[in-house]
Image (cartoon, rainbow, N blue to C red):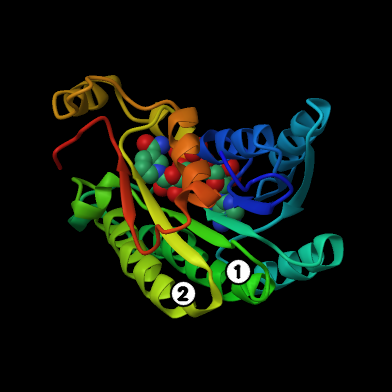
């Protein structure tokens, strides 16, 4: 992929799953990685794995739902790298329950991490991108943005990310910053491995390719949107979902 060589890119929730796969893929493209996660041991391990394979990576402790944590991370990145070229707002959580069983805390944490976290991230990081060339943000939305049983909190957050993505894309186009989202279908990560087998089998009926995604397949799409190969793509939501007609 063109234009990722030497680009400094922060991946949130980079300790495992799609975030880890994205960090590893970007490192293969010779990007300079900042692996952010509230799980600092996990982020450290991913950064170490990248360095052991000859790449460049540091880890940063980051709770995406905290403005202070974003400010600390932005200050650290400015000190280490002088700015940032790419941001992947990937950190996410689920707290699935049907509407009448869902506690207010289940709503709050899912909105705070998945939606407010990305908003705080854009606010903290856009100033580090202004004045650099070829900067790009990718948010992780989901098929669930159309609504999903037991996910009134998560679906609302992932639909909200569509509005956030397009709005920041419109506002930041003048600064040359492209903003897009990936909407993955079911992807085999610890988040999904927690779902019962019979529920997962039911999902496959709605996926023409009849299988779940692997994290590396989502990572490839994220890398493409961050790269110069996507230089005329902004304000888009790219489904990576095996053809799911949802
Ligand atoms: N796995 C799927 O099927 C799927 C489908 C569509 C969208 N997504 C989205 O992709 C993203 C990654 O999902 P995943 O399956 O890899 O999840 P995962 O649970 O495997 O990993 C999530 C990571 O985010 C980190 N995290 C959680 N809360 C955080 C916080 N407050 N601050 C910083 N880091 C935090 C966790 O420590 C973990 O490392 C999420 O936004 C998710 O909603 C996943």
Q: Quadrant of the N terminus?
A: top right
Q: Can residue 88 be seen from the camera position used here?
A: yes
- Label 1 CB, ligand 1: below 8 Å? yes
Image coords of residue 139 (percent x, y): 45, 56
Of the two numbered discs 2 and 1 on the same chain, state the one appearing first in sequence. 1
224 lies left or right of 127: left
Name the one closer to the observer, 15 or 55: 55
Residue at horizontal 32 percent and vertical 63 percent from the top: 162
Instruction: Judge the density around disc 2: few (<14), some (14-19), many (≥20) Cα neighbours within 10 Å.
Output: few
Image coords of residue 136 (percent x, y): 54, 60
Name the one closer to the observer, 217 or 35: 217
| In front: label 2 or label 1 | 2
200 lies left or right of 166: left
Do labels 2 and 1 touch, CB within 8 Å? no
Res 66 label: 1
Residue that badge 2 annotates: 173
Residue at horizontal 57 percent and vertical 67 percent from the top: 121
């Amino acid at each position: 992929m063109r234009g990722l060589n030497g680009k400094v890119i922060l991946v949130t929730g980079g300790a495992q799953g799609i975030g880890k796969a994205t960090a590893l893929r970007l490192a293969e493209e010779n990007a300079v990685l900042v692996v952010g996660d509230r799980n600092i041991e996990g982020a450290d391990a991913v950064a170490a794995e990248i360095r052991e394979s000859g790449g460049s990576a540091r880890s940063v402790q980051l709770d995406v739902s905290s403005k202070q944590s974003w400010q600390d991370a932005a200050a650290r990145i400015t000190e280490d790298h002088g700015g940032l070229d790419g941001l992947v707002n990937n950190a996410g959580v689920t707290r699935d329950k049907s509407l009448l069983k869902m506690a207010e805390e289940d709503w709050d944490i899912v909105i705070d991490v998945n939606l407010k976290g990305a908003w705080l991230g854009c606010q903290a990081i856009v100033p580090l991108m202004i004045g650099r060339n070829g900067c790009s943000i990718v948010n992780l939305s989901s098929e669930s943005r159309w609504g999903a049983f037991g996910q009134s909190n998560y679906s609302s957050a992932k639909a909200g990310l569509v509005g956030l993505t397009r709005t920041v894309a419109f506002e930041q186009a003048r600064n040359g910053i492209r903003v897009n989202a990936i909407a993955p279908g079911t992807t085999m990560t610890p988040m999904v491995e927690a779902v019962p087998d019979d529920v997962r089998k039911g999902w496959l009926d709605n996926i023409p390719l009849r299988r779940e995604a692997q994290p590396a397949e989502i990572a490839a799409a994220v890398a493409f949107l961050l790269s110069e190969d996507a230089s005329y793509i902004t304000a888009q939501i790219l489904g990576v979902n095996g053809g799911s007609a949802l």
